[in-house]
Image: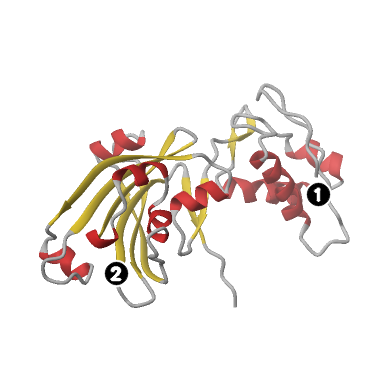
């Protein structure tokens, strides 16, 4: 597909979609792929309307159930929304992140986003017994505690809370301009293994204010403990993400 027109969201967009009936990929997924590409390329910005099922099925020679299934695929991904009396619209873009041993900053930059970081707290001090045990610190070792607000394209996305041994600590200035893992790699510290737990909470007043979400809004959480090849704990993180803008993706193989 090579989309060439853009939309203001006032009229449904007729995209130059193509489906290949000889291909092994199901027709509904080919349709979903074409619309998703238009959304990701900015041809269909947030608020744009797409053609209705009847128009798409006639133009592409597909059955209405096939078209409906293709659109539903993108509704389930959070890219489209059906509105009574309005039609099917593109919603504000979400960040879809694979569950992998990578940093949020690196993933956003690789996806063509513009991540920025505000360092809200940067404290070096003596660890609590719990933190010392979690990071496998030796007696007398200090810890760096961080709280950062990560934005993407100017919009708040995640609140990142991390603790790491002070011997690995990047400067506050570094963390304002790059990701934590990139700063660690510059010091010769590389992540090898991680234990990760994903969950959900509702926003309290502070989280809601920082993430531009109402109190009680759904938030995703990720807790991660990362080890280097020699078994040292590099960092422990507890991150909170806007569920309205962020999803985790996992590929399962039999």
Q: Quadrant of the C terminus?
A: bottom right
Q: How is the image coloured?
A: secondary structure
Q: Residue at x 37, y 71 (%)?
A: 228
Q: CA distance from mark 2 to mark 1?
A: 55 Å
Which is nearer the eye, 192 or 220? 192
Q: Which mark is on residue 63?
A: 1
- Residue 202 position within the rendered picture, expressed as x and y whole percent measured from the top left: 30, 46
Q: Check the image and name the residue furthest to the front.
A: 187
Mark 1 element type:
loop
Residue neighbourhood size for the residue with mark 1, other residues' Cα within 10 Å, grouped as few (<14), some (14–19), many (≥20) = some
Left/right of residue 196 with respect to residue 48 in the rendered view = left
Q: Quadrant of the N terminus?
A: top right
- Residue 52 position within the rendered picture, expressed as x and y whole percent measured from the top left: 73, 35
Q: Residue at x 25, y 41 (%)?
A: 204
Q: Is residue 228 above or below residue 240?
A: below
Residue carrying label 2: 233
Precedes in sequence: disc 2 or disc 1: 1
Q: Residue at x 53, y 47 (%)?
A: 109
């Amino acid at each position: 597909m090579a989309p060439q027109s853009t939309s203001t969201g006032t009229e449904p967009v007729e995209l130059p979609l193509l489906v290949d009936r000889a291909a092994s990929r199901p027709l509904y997924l080919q349709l979903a792929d074409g619309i998703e590409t238009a959304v990701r390329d900015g041809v269909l910005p947030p608020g744009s309307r797409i053609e209705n099922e009847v128009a798409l099925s006639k133009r592409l020679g597909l059955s209405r159930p096939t078209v409906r299934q293709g659109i539903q695929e993108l509704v389930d991904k959070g890219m489209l929304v059906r509105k009574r009396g309005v039609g099917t619209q593109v919603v504000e873009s979400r960040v879809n992140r694979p569950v992998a041993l990578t940093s949020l900053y690196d993933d956003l930059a690789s996806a063509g986003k513009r991540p920025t970081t505000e360092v809200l707290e940067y404290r070096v001090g003596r660890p609590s017994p719990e933190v010392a045990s979690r990071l496998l610190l030796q007696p007398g070792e200090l810890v760096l505690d961080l709280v950062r607000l990560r934005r993407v394209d100017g919009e708040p996305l995640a609140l990142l809370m991390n603790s790491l041994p002070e011997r690995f600590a990047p400067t506050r200035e570094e963390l304002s301009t790059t990701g934590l893992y990139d700063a660690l790699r510059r010091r010769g510290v590389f992540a090898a293994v991680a234990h990760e737990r994903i969950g959900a909470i509702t926003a309290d007043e502070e989280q809601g204010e920082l993430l531009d979400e109402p109190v009680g809004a759904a938030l995703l959480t990720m807790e991660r403990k990362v080890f280097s090849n020699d078994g040292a704990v590099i960092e422990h993180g507890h991150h909170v993400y806007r569920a309205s803008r962020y999803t985790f993706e996992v590929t399962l193989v039999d």
